[in-house]
Amino acid sequence: MKEELLDLNNVMQALKKCLPTNQERIGLHEPYFGGNEWKYVKECLDTGWVSSVGKYVDQFEQRLAEYTGAKKAVAVVNGTAALHIALILAGVIRDDEVIVPTLTFIATTNAITYCGAVPHFADSEERTLGLDPYKLEAYLQEITDVRTEGCFNKKTGRRIKAVVPMHTFGHPVDLDPLVEVCHKFKLELIEDAAESLGSFYKGRHTGNWGKLSILSFNGNKTITTGGGGAILTNDEELGKMAKHITTTAKLPHKWNFYHDQIGFNYRMPNINAALGCAQLEQLPEFLVRKRALAQGYMERFSAIPGMRIFREPGFAQSNYWLNVLLLEEDYKQYRDAILEATNSIDIMTRPAWILMHELPIFVSCPHMDLTVAENIETRLINIPSSVKLSKNEL
Amino acid sequence: MKEELLDLNNVMQALKKCLPTNQERIGLHEPYFGGNEWKYVKECLDTGWVSSVGKYVDQFEQRLAEYTGAKKAVAVVNGTAALHIALILAGVIRDDEVIVPTLTFIATTNAITYCGAVPHFADSEERTLGLDPYKLEAYLQEITDVRTEGCFNKKTGRRIKAVVPMHTFGHPVDLDPLVEVCHKFKLELIEDAAESLGSFYKGRHTGNWGKLSILSFNGNKTITTGGGGAILTNDEELGKMAKHITTTAKLPHKWNFYHDQIGFNYRMPNINAALGCAQLEQLPEFLVRKRALAQGYMERFSAIPGMRIFREPGFAQSNYWLNVLLLEEDYKQYRDAILEATNSIDIMTRPAWILMHELPIFVSCPHMDLTVAENIETRLINIPSSVKLSKNEL
């Protein structure tokens, strides 16, 4: 019988030592409401302003812009809707191709299909867990033909219009070289920052490198509005247009309903924005706590052979939205055993998403060599990362 | 100088007599929170269950099904999203045509375009303010060719797949003859019941005649969830599919993210559903109050020549979501004067929506003769209809 490399018990002990002992069930990422949530929500109920217009929508948008440093933020129903609109405003149309990492949540890919466009899958790098700009550049060099009208895939004949990197589990991709690649190949950059509110790249908030970018405030994110998302942009005109087409493209008038284009009903209700305002006030504190939790994990797991906790690269300050336990090659055979052991005692952990190019619905989409992402996927486990799990006092 | 037919003062007096005197501004339809709203919403905050799963989502769906008599209700982010999904599940695909009244809110028409399909505009009848089934039948007889594969527009060559009547301002269309037309021409029926929660046709709740139907809980509706909508169906399988594709089409698994088709992120957050549960409990009372307000309007305005308040036809029990003041032909020249006079003293009124076929974005879509809708549009004014305006004690 082959000798076991791993003592599963050690892993479980390390994990438990980092986590509170007084909780029956440790979720992966649960919301924390410790501020003005009830006050603001109650005000919506008391005044009747719960729906698509209201002061909290305006306030939330303004404060998101302030916090991220983007010129304009537009609050919408969720991150998927934000992606859909960002792609439309970046000029993605039917039969375009859009570069997207295969290691991402399905929302990024679905939104591309809503435009009638085709996802084109790119590989990730272990340094960031996100899109590898250098590998992408070499690939585009080989397969594309850059003309005055744009970048064309020589194999499919389709235009490649945009690149949508995703800051995986909150960890920023290497944006500077990616911006250069986009410039060189005439591609629009849209950052899927759904997971990276509170994450910075070279001192500036993620979401400021692309033409547009998006955030998510789903219940499992660093801050939540119940369900919600936002579009960010530094282009005032695009910002105005984002507001316009997410609110049915109706022109302002005292009573007439004149819509000047096909619009969407993607506005965030005021009651959800109220929650968002209260959550955003606590974000700096949340980030301190999440960082402390990550630090604790790193220390504990440094003593266990065969694995490590993912650490932000030098250019990044990560929100550590979801902490990542990365197994070494020789230890990846234990991934499922760790998943089973933790979940069986109600410590929630999960593997990476199934890679997009492996889902039957996207299996025929174009892609580059994806061996790094394929390898990461076999070795990655997300471990509990809620704000409330930190032992720092709130 | 031509003698004036209308004494505007009389109209203003009639309106004021029906409305409370202690309010600075009388909205068209404002929400009323008089029940368990605080309690349920606070419970979401206290327990942390604010997002896409939670007991209020389940409860709201169950209670909507009970109230409407539909087998299955699926709560979603808004009525537009519900329409999009209903059209997809009814089999509407790219380049199909879908019959829709020109007198409707733009959501009905937009949702058709999201499927890549083409709106085909139909006329309304004055009896219901909604789609005229008899006129539609005569028109389809003339322009279509019904084959084994479906109903084809002889002029455009496109398949006509579905009919989406809208119960205008809450008043039910004449469903029985419409069902017959759909059957005869192999068309799927989808009821846009966004405005008609609490409205019945021949004793049964609207939304039960089509293959699928939809509701809206926007802030201006009879009950609100902030923003929200629902898909209704009496087909269990379609109901399951509606839930599946509105929740990213993910198959249940303890940790894997396997999505078996292109899905949408259209789920209603639990905090919004909590509001909906509390509102739904009050719906019967709301309907009594809205009916009393409508009755008051009818009585007051019966004394004014040249106009009348729209009254439900014999087959319908309307929720009177938005009361309608209909001017007679000779008096329609006063529509804008009435709109100006009322809005200038903060009594909100508005005309019908601009007809869909008159919006530049839809001007090239196919349509039948639309003279009845065109005529209604020039004579119609919506007047304040909020629950709280009724003088009935709550």
Image (cartoon, coloured by chain):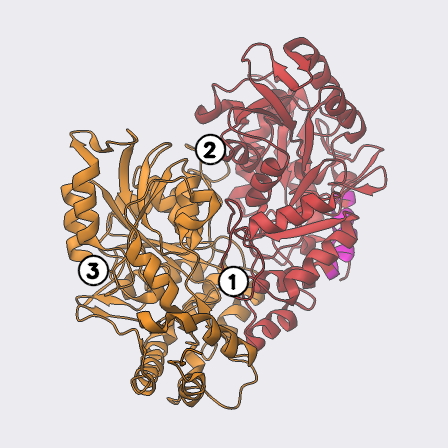
Chain colours: A orange, B red
**Residue B217 appears in the picture as rendered:** no
**Between residues B300 and A109, which one lies in front from this camera angle?**
A109
* Circle 2 crowding by C-alpha within 10 Å: few under 14, some 14–19, many from 20: many
> Whole-percent x and y of residue B19?
68, 50
Where's the C terminus of chain B, which quadrant? bottom right
Residue kind at label 3, given as amino acid type: Asp
Instruction: Note whether A370 is above or below B171 in the view shown.
Output: below
**Which residue corresponds to mark 1?**
A271
Tell me the mark number nearer the camera, choosing from 1 and 3: 3
**Which residue corresponds to mark 2?**
A258
Tell whether B255 sits left or right of B68: left
> Could you tell me which chain the residue with mark 3 belongs to?
A
What is the number of the mark on residue A174?
3
Tell whether B38 sits left or right of B137: left
Disc 2, SS: loop
Disc 1, SS: helix
Q: Are the residues tagged 1 and 3 within 8 Å (C-beta)?
A: no
